[in-house]
Amino acid sequence: MQEPQFTAEYTDEAKIQLRELAYENREKIVEAIGLFELVGTKYKNINDLGDGLFEIKPKGVRAYFMYDPTRRKIIIVGFICLKKTQKAPKQYMKQARINIRNYIKELEVNK
């Protein structure tokens, strides 16, 4: 069995958003993130959105993540939503960055 390339962690906001998705959409994004954990940067449905933010978007669902700057092989999923437009909405990207930065700050406080 292949060893995972990454481990995904989720901000509290992303966990709530994931639970609120319809079952079929939740399964799509969980499967995509799981595949990314296994194959890493070779996963084809990843877009670099700039400023360290990336997007996974399998069939109608988006998840925004960043690589953890202090822990190798960790990605932090900061925002999950349905894909309604071709371009990633700027307000979702901004909120993902805020959620991830707050998550990292909380980790540092709890060390």
Image: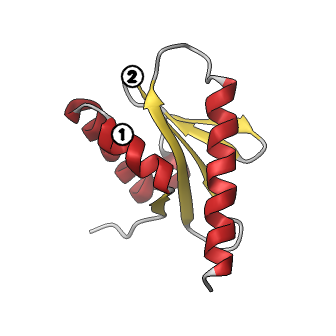
Q: Which residue lies furthest to the bottom in this view?
A: 111
Q: Residue at x 51, y 56 (%)?
A: 11
Specify whether 7 is left or right of 20: right
Specify the amino acid type for callout 2: Gly
Name the amino acid, label 1. Ile
Q: Mark 1 packing: few (<14 Cα in 10 Å), some, or many (20+)?
A: many
43, 111: nearer the viewer: 111
Residue 36 percent location from the top left of the image: 44, 50
91 or 2, which lies in front?
91
Identify the disc placed on residue 60.
2
Q: Residue at x 47, y 44 (%)?
A: 43
The quadrant the C terminus occupies is bottom right
* SS class, disc 2: loop
Q: Mark 1 points at which residue?
A: 29
Q: Which residue lies furthest to the right in this view?
A: 51
Sequence-wise, the earlier of marks 1 and 2 is: 1
- For the point 46% across and 60% down, the residue is 8
Is residue 66 in view? yes
Separation (CA) of disc 1 from disc 2: 9 Å
Q: How many residues crowd around disc 2 within 10 Å: few (fewer than 14), some, or many (20 or more)?
A: few
Residue 62 in view in this figure: no
Q: Which colour scheme is used?
A: secondary structure
- Left or right side of 91 for 56: left
Front-most of 2 and 28?
A: 28
Q: Position of residue 50 (x, y in %)?
A: 76, 38
Residue 56: image location, x then y, percent: 50, 37
Q: Is residue 51 left or right of residue 13?
A: right
Q: Residue at position x 50%, y 54% from top?
A: 40
Pick out the residue farthest to the left: 23
- When the figure is inspected, residue 105 is found, relative to residue 65, above or below; the finding is below
In percent of width and height, residue 87 lies at 62, 18
